[in-house]
Image (cartoon, rainbow, N blue to C red):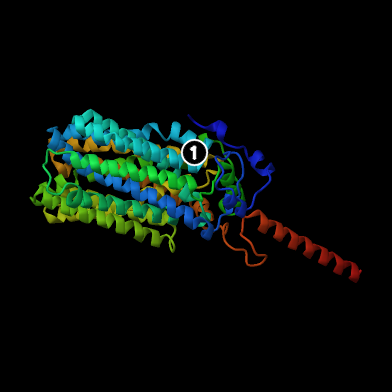
Amino acid sequence: MFGKKQEPEIAEVLDQRRPSNVEAINMQHRKSVSNKGLTGASALTVRQSILPITLVTILFFLWGFAYGLLDVLNAKFQNSLNITAAKAGGLQGAYFGAYLIGPPTYSGWIVRKFGYRWTFITGLCIYGVGALMFWPSAVKRSFAGFCGSLFIVGSGLSTLETSANPFIATCGPPRLSEFRLELSQSFQAIGSVMAPLLASRVFFKETDPKDLTNVQWTYLGIAVFVFLLAVVFYFSPIPEVTDADMALQAEQSAGLTGYIDKPMRHQYKLFFGVVAQFCYVGAQVGVAAQFIKYSVESANISDAAGSDRYAIGQGLFAIGRFAAAGLMMIAKPRWVLMVFLTGVVIFIAASMGAHGEGGVATLTLVLFFESCVFPTIFTLAIRGLGRHTKRGSSWIVASVSGGALFPSLTGLVADHKGYHIAMCVPLVGFVIAFAFPVYLNTVCARELDGFRETKIGYQDKEVGGTIGDVVCEERRASVVHEEKGLHASEYELKG
């Protein structure tokens, strides 16, 4: 479960033969890879990482689309099966509850044992099975069946996140880690925006509210697409980045970051990141689940008008991710995280007292400032984990399970005190999450800035080759040796 035996020791890493980044690309079709072995992927260039990152970004869009459908299906099931809002909340519990189980157990084990490629394929297959299960659930009109199907879908998506998030963060030059994940996750936000729009205008347009036929066909189409995508990933050029590669990269950056190899129990930044992510995701899902009802209460508008306001908020969320990615090219990610979380806390607090369209506007701005938080917490929390990177990443993904807790608490308060007061529940989660960038900017600044300054994965203009790659280091060592020999000869001539 905890994966300690699958992680290399530093001595093992340093004693191995070091492959080049070219070998990492050439070996990308092998069946599996030892997590303790070097592959050469610690020094991949931007050009070498573009294709695999593009393929994995498709996965981000995929589960953004699945998450976007969740709220639409929630309402559809309520109308079709005549169930209460509280019971319908079980759908979110089933979906996010899967994140608590998969990453720290089977999916975390798969990514360390067999590598990223097979974890992608496994997650897609699980997702496909869950999508297929919606057909008999709809035929039997079984709410328990829908919850079970969503749990399987959540299990597949949590497996994909266990591999996709750290893969994006580590595949390429380390200084661009936050930018890569932020940009890829921007397409997840686009999927979240597109799903409800397609659902209302294509999948469920002019259908009987009690009819679940379109739900069946929608998920059948998703299942077919997902299984085809699994085949694509089997044949795709996906380089493997092992914990040994990350340990080597951390050692190479130690001069700038102050990195020292530590056991997992001393990775305090990771543990703080897990708590922050749990509270943040829970608060984010709590706001999303109650946004429409809050809008109805605040501005006295219809559910349909509230849905339109929510679509605007989701659009701003997607725009915010692209904006944050751009900011990370010119500003330190720890600063960007601090600014965006500050905006979240300010506007969620304001939404508790604001009424009318002004209240809706403040909650909409919360969605905008939420945009960069998840991927930035993720990448900053796993910075400097070295040989513990994959295990630490699985813990961060498991913290997404906060989405199973906060919506229920928010709804409970809303039932008794109204939706404005209910925003105090997400506020608490956001405040706890806000403590994390404070910690990063005070305690971890040197380490994080060091990774941003490293040139690993970039071209060495003096000797040619890629900085951090074994070929480049051999050339540099040869140049240094020749210079020493030349100086020695000059000294002898002078003597």
Q: Residue at x 14, y 45 (%)?
A: 293
Residue 408 drawn at (x, y percent): 23, 35
157 above or below 342? above
Expressed as whole percent of the image width and height from the top left, the position of residue 308 reads 16, 54
Amino acid found under the numbered disc labelled 1: Val
Q: Is residue 319 left or right of residue 355?
A: right
Q: On the rendered structure, is 460 left or right of 337?
A: right
Q: Nearer the viewer, residue 441 or 380?
A: 380
Asked whether residue 284 is in view, the answer is no
The residue lying toward the viewer, choosing from 219 and 370, is: 219
Picture quarter with the C terminus: bottom right
Q: Would you name the residue on which mark 1 appears? A: 111
- Residue at image location 90% in from the left, 67% down from the top: 492
Residue ID at (20%, 29%): 140
Residue 398 against residue 187 in the figure, above or below: above
Task: Return the x and y of residue 445 as percentages of the image width and height.
Answer: 48, 52
- Marks counted in the figure total 1
Residue density around tag 1, few if under 14, some if 14–19, many if 20 or more, within 10 Å? many
Name which residue lies at 16% across and 35% down: 85
* Horizontal relation, residue 82 to residue 48: left or right: left
Image position, residue 101 (x, y; %): 38, 31
Element class at badge 1: helix
Res 491 seen here: yes
Q: Quadrant of residue 361?
A: bottom left
Q: Which quadrant of the figure has residue 228?
A: top left
Most distant residue in the right direction: 495
